Image (cartoon, grey):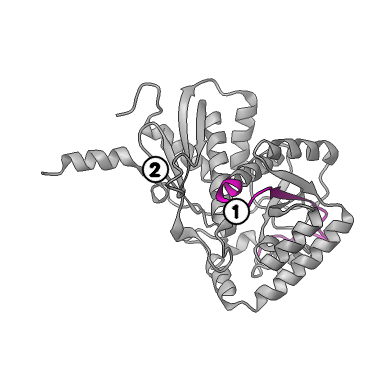
């Protein structure tokens, strides 16, 4: 039974359904929530991990961090202040965080703007134009990522050229990795309610893909066309001082904040992770930005094309468990 200061289950379902628009590696959505009437417990869903792509499960935890921040934003937009505790039980490392809606309130304008950004945000895998007002935007992004203990490095033209080479090297290595290629094909094989993944309509054609020298080499899609010209997006590298699960979760929250802020400003974004998945490539990125643990990169620019179709999301009941319903069901069973 929920207390008078706790949201009802319909509100809980609506908010977490909203937050599930969070991006993740190949749209794998590697998170689970368990609601006990007052608090939601977050963990990684081991069945949604990609061992051939994300061999150290870094991106699984990072994706859960993105979902955590999306949930905080969604609760704020719904008119609830939240209390978040990360790794509340040191003995249970699979329990990444607890989120408790503690106080209803009238949502502020910033909360509403960021909540709306959840619905409008998408991964723009097409070539972009240079972002407007970049000097101011970059300072804002550096600030909001820093609140989660994450350092943001923006690449200049020389560093971007070096990153192009790292990306090409990574693509060359991955081309001869049959397990990686099989996993990539499975997650881009088409819409599937249980799988989610990336349909062809959100992936660039072979021609447009060639105009994005730091994009992951996905199978050719049907999105676009994006017109003439190569990608002019700016690139931000998000790094942490450590490489533990706590750092990854914090970086995921920072990534979410960056993506939503850019969306609120009318900018397009696309997270990039393939250049930090292989140890050799990641070491080169670390040297490039002068940070020990680069975790994820983001392309930021102005869209040249209309938003693609929305990528599918898992059914709510596949990732949100209501322990109260389980308790009620148990109570009704004969002894």
Span shown in magenta: 222-249
The correct choice, above or below, for 123 with respect to 102 in the image is below
* For residue 127, side relative to residue 116 (left or right): right
Question: Is 135 in front, or is 281?
Answer: 281
* For residue 250, side relative to residue 162 (left or right): left
Residue holding disc 2: 34
Q: Quick one: which residue is furthest to the right in this view?
A: 158
Count the marks: how many? Answer: 2
Q: Are marks 1 and 2 in contact (CB under 8 Å)?
A: no
Secondary structure type for disc 2: strand
The residue at 32%/41% (across/down) is 323
Label 2: few (<14), some or many (≥20) within 10 Å? Answer: some
Secondary structure type for disc 1: loop
Residue 332, position as x, y percentages in the image = 16, 40
The CA distance from mark 1 to mark 2 is 30 Å
* For residue 86, side relative to residue 281 (left or right): left
Q: Earlier in the sequence, mark 1 or mark 2?
A: 2
The correct choice, above or below, for 106 with respect to 303 in the image is above
Quadrant showing the C terminus: top left
Quadrant showing the N terminus: top left
Question: Is 210 in front, or is 100?
Answer: 100
Question: Is 244 in front, or is 126?
Answer: 244
Report if residue 243 lies within the magenta region: yes
Q: Quick one: which residue is furthest to the front in this view?
A: 91
Residue 177, position as x, y percentages in the image = 61, 77
1 or 2: mark nearer the eye: 2
Residue 99, position as x, y percentages in the image = 47, 35
The disc label shown at residue 309, or none: 1
């Amino acid at each position: 039974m929920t207390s008078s200061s706790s949201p009802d289950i319909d509100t809980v379902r609506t908010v977490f359904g909203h937050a599930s628009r969070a991006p993740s590696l190949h749209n794998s959505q590697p998170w689970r929530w368990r609601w006990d009437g007052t608090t939601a417990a977050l963990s990684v869903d081991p069945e949604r991990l990609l061992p051939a792509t994300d061999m150290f499960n870094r991106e699984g935890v990072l994706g859960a961090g993105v979902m955590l921040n999306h949930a905080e934003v969604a609760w704020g937009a719904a008119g609830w202040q939240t209390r978040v505790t990360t790794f509340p039980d040191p003995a249970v490392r699979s329990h990444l965080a607890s989120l408790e809606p503690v106080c209803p309130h009238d949502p502020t304008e910033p909360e509403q703007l960021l909540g709306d950004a959840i619905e409008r945000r998408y991964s723009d895998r097409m070539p972009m134009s240079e972002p407007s007002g970049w000097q101011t935007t970059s300072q804002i992004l550096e600030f909001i990522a820093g609140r989660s203990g994450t350092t943001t490095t923006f690449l200049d033209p020389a560093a971007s050229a070096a990153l192009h080479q790292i990306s090409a090297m990574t693509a060359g290595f991955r081309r001869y990795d049959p397990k990686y290629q099989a996993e990539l094909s499975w997650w881009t094989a088409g819409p599937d309610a249980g799988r989610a993944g990336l349909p062809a309509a959100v992936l660039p054609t072979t021609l447009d893909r060639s105009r994005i020298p730091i994009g992951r080499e996905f199978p050719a899609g049907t999105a676009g066309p994006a017109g003439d010209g190569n990608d002019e997006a700016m690139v931000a590298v998000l790094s942490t001082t450590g490489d533990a699960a706590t750092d990854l979760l914090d970086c995921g929250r920072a990534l979410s904040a960056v993506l939503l802020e850019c969306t609120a400003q009318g900018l397009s974004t696309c997270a990039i992770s393939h250049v930090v998945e292989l140890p050799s490539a990641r070491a080169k990125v670390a040297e490039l930005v002068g940070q020990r643990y680069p975790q994820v990169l983001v392309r930021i620019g102005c869209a040249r094309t209309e938003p693609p179709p929305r990528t599918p999301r898992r059914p709510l009941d596949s990732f949100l468990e209501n322990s109260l319903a389980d308790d009620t069901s148990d109570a009704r069973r004969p002894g």
